[in-house]
Amino acid sequence: MQKKWWKESVVYQIYPRSFMDSNGDGIGDLKGITSKLDYLKQLGVDVIWLSPVYKSPNDDNGYDISDYQNIMDDFGTMADWDELLAGLHARGMKLMMDLVVNHSSDEHHWFVESRKSKDNPYRDYYIWRKGKDGQEPNNWTSVFSGSAWEYDKETDEYFLHLFSKKQPDLNWENENLRKEIYDMMTWWLDKGIDGFRMDVINLISKAEGLPSVPGGKRYEWGGDYFMNGPKVHDYIQEMNREVLSKYDIITVGETPGASTEDAKQYANEEGTELNMIFTFEHMDLDSGPGGKWDVKPWKLTDLKEVMTKWQKELEDKGWNSLYLNNHDQPRMVSRLGDDQEYRVISAKMLATFLHFLQGTPYIYQGEEIGMTNVQFQSIEEYNDIEIHNMYREKVIDGGEDHEKIMEAIYIKGRDNARTPMQWDATEHGGFTTGTPWLKVNPNYKEINVNNALADENSIFYFYQKLIKLRKENDIIVYGSYDLILDDDEKIYAYTRTLGEEKLIVLCNFSNEEVGFELPDSLSFTTNRKLIGNYSTNELLSPLKPYEARAYLIK
Ligand code: NOJ
């Protein structure tokens, strides 16, 4: 396996709207981020992934871009951005920008032109079709509820939008469009950025003819017709040839619905596509047949099955990204740990579990202080378009029970991750001197950066240590993974092996003390504890509630 700096790195994701507000308008901004660079350096992360900061009408908080080469007014200016990049580089950190090119905003000038007439030079930059029998061109639903098609009376045709109707899908079949995208990427790389996180990049190639999902229902999830579509690898390989291969950068593709087989292509070790992708399989474990909002309990053995499949299948063939939360997912400690009695302990356990796997770890802002999910009383207090569209479809139009849907939002809603970063115990958690665009989680008085920095046993310092260990032990980066105690429903245990070296990681996912016996095949005479979230040293002693320990063994 090849050694690469991006395999040895730890990435920290910033959702700019919620990170730090410098001017009191209630919205996080670039100057706010720059003011916190020493904090990020202290944590020890190598790369910052910035969720979109480009010009945007904010229908989907920046994931609807109206100008790819300018900065959103709410966030500041290009000069602020230059200062942020310089500040990162001066501290030895790198910057990964978000690239959102499956769709643009409907306010992008390409779309403004495109919708004007059927013979406009930009018409074909988007996906336009005639209606069928007075209805939409096909029966696909949008990820954000309702039809994936919007009628435009100007030219009496529909355009495709897999997300909101203000996010029309770009037509990657069009060569001129692809060239414009590559030029734009090159422009950013020449400004000195260090990589791209690519939004839903496996959705850019749609099935020939855009067929309806069979079964005759008016609206159906058409994922099979646009996830990992027929030309997606051609496009990504072309992008790699034209742009990516010319720079020493980090690339990660967001790829819902990608299997490990797909991943072996997207993230191939030869480097003809991307460095790594984000799988969704572990994030879907608590989704029932009705999808994301149909919440079901998850089992530890299911998590083991998914993680082990990705670890083993990609071994020597590709590279994993490791994450348990981001701006689209609930807070990991609320979802997989215990955000009450064992908040600190279970957050450390989850961090141990993740950071010792093979792959590049991603930390989402606030994870390093154990921020939790939030419960707002009324639907109006939520901001997210996905939440509002779903609520309208299910409760207002569909008559489903309000309480039941609020429960689902409490568990799965994206705003769980988007409440402002909690810096200190002052009003609004020190995030803003104004009124925050989304309310701060009321637990900010206890859970905040100030408290974490003042407590040597905090989650923050635990992450700092995990990151440091990664720098000191090649085995954490490059060792191969093997699951042990396969059927245990409480303990997730695995080994890593690199040459003569071996590492053992023991994580108790339950709130009970649990004993265990190691397999006979795992013999060793000495062990050295690297990290743990209790003071226990003895490798074989039972694991306390949510205890995690990692040892080098010989
Ligand atoms: C995935 C992004 O992470 C999410 O926040 C966004 O809503 C969709 N893609 C559409 O861009």
Image: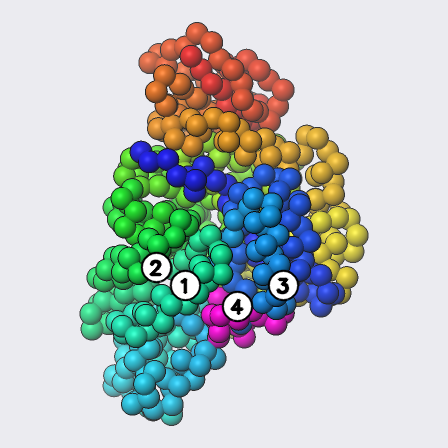
Pointer 4 local density, CA inside 10 Å: few below 14, some 14–19, many at least 20: many
Predominant SS along the magenta part? loop
Location of residue 169 (image quadrant): bottom left
Q: Does dot 2 land on a helix, a strand or a loop?
A: loop
Q: CA distance from mark 3 to mark 1?
A: 20 Å
Query: Label 1 near label 2: C-beta < 8 Å?
Result: yes
Q: Which mark is residue 54?
A: 4
Q: Is residue 18 left or right of residue 305?
A: right
In the picture, the quarter occupied by the C terminus is: top left
Q: Nearer the viewer, mark 4 or mark 2?
A: 2
Which of the two labelled residues, at mark 3 and mark 4, occupies the earlier sequence position?
A: 4
Residue 419 drawn above or below residue 47: below
Q: CA distance from mark 2 to mark 1?
A: 7 Å
What residue is pinned by disc 2? Answer: 243
- Is-magenta flag for residue 373? no
Name the kind of residue labelled 3 in the image: Asp
Which of the two labelled residues, at mark 2 and mark 1, occupies the earlier sequence position?
A: 1
Q: CA distance from mark 2 to mark 3?
A: 26 Å
Q: Position of residue 522 (x, y in %)?
A: 37, 14
Q: Which mark is residue 80?
A: 3
Query: What residue span does the magenta drawing correspond to?
Result: 56-75
What residue is pinned by disc 1? Answer: 185
Pointer 2 local density, CA inside 10 Å: few below 14, some 14–19, many at least 20: some
